[in-house]
Image: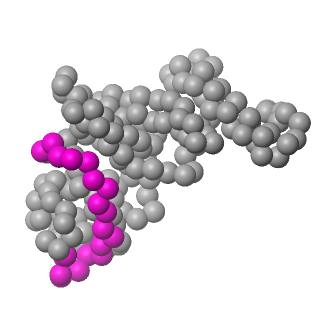
Amino acid sequence: MESATPTSQRRLLRASPALPHEQSGLAFPLLMRPLATHGGEGLELHTSLASLWSALVDLEAPCYLTACHDFRSADGYYRKYRIIYVNGEPYPYHLAISSHWMVHYFSAGMELTADGQGLVLETNATMLAHREPRFGPLAHKNPYIDQIIAAFERMLQARTHSRPVQTI
């Protein structure tokens, strides 16, 4: 994968004899993701038209093609930062680090490129922020989740002018 300026070019395609790759403005490597999937399900990296075409024919369903950018840090690892916005304010949710390009930590997020620019991998208005089991492997996220929940409660109170929301 070559390092490139982040873009958000996406094209919805169906497998057909006339793949509009040349007209799309996208270049390899490409990520192919079936429509209506999430969490890395069905996400594939393709570095050639032959590989992509074979996958499209096998899929027989609509999919997204997205330009893939090399977002490895200087140490060779990929990092994915998850940030949740509440009422326009950013709150950190998690950081995942992996030696594999698909940094899968229950959802998608954003990376930093070598030159310090933010590369948005995916945005999702329905991301779930929930407390983790107290002694579970992801319990370290709970203080950040508490901040997100508190911010959400403040936003609700401000918008509804109601008494404090009781959480379960």
Please report the bounds of the magenta region as a residue range. Answer: 2-20
Q: Is residue 98 above or below residue 109?
A: above
Taking 99 as reference, is 40 left or right? right
Quadrant of the snapshot with the C terminus: top right
Residue 83 lies in the magenta stretch: no
Residue 111 at x, y = what percent?
33, 37
Taking 162 as reference, is 150 left or right? left
* The one of 120 and 59 positioned closer to us in this rendering: 120
Q: Is residue 10 above or below residue 77?
A: below
Taking 147 as reference, is 51 left or right? left
Where residue 50 sits, quadrant-wise, is bottom left
Quadrant of the snapshot with the N terminus: top left
* The one of 130 and 158 positioned closer to us in this rendering: 158
* The one of 165 and 142 positioned closer to us in this rendering: 165
Q: Is residue 100 visible?
A: no
Q: How is the image coloured?
A: one colour
Q: Is residue 143 visible?
A: yes
Residue 88 at x, y = what percent?
58, 42
Q: Is residue 8 above or below residue 155?
A: below
Where residue 53 sits, quadrant-wise, is bottom left
Q: Which residue is at a point 40% across and 33% down the rendered structure image? A: 81
Q: Which residue is at a point 61% across and 40% down the rendered structure image? A: 86
Q: Main secondary structure of the magenta part?
A: loop
Q: Check the image and name the residue furthest to the bottom.
A: 17
Q: Which residue is at a point 25% across and 36% down the rendered structure image? A: 113
Q: Which residue is at a point 57% across and 51% down the rendered structure image? A: 126
* The one of 127 and 43 positioned closer to us in this rendering: 127
Q: Check the image and name the residue furthest to the right.
A: 163
Residue 4 lies in the magenta stretch: yes
Residue 89 at x, y = what percent?
57, 37
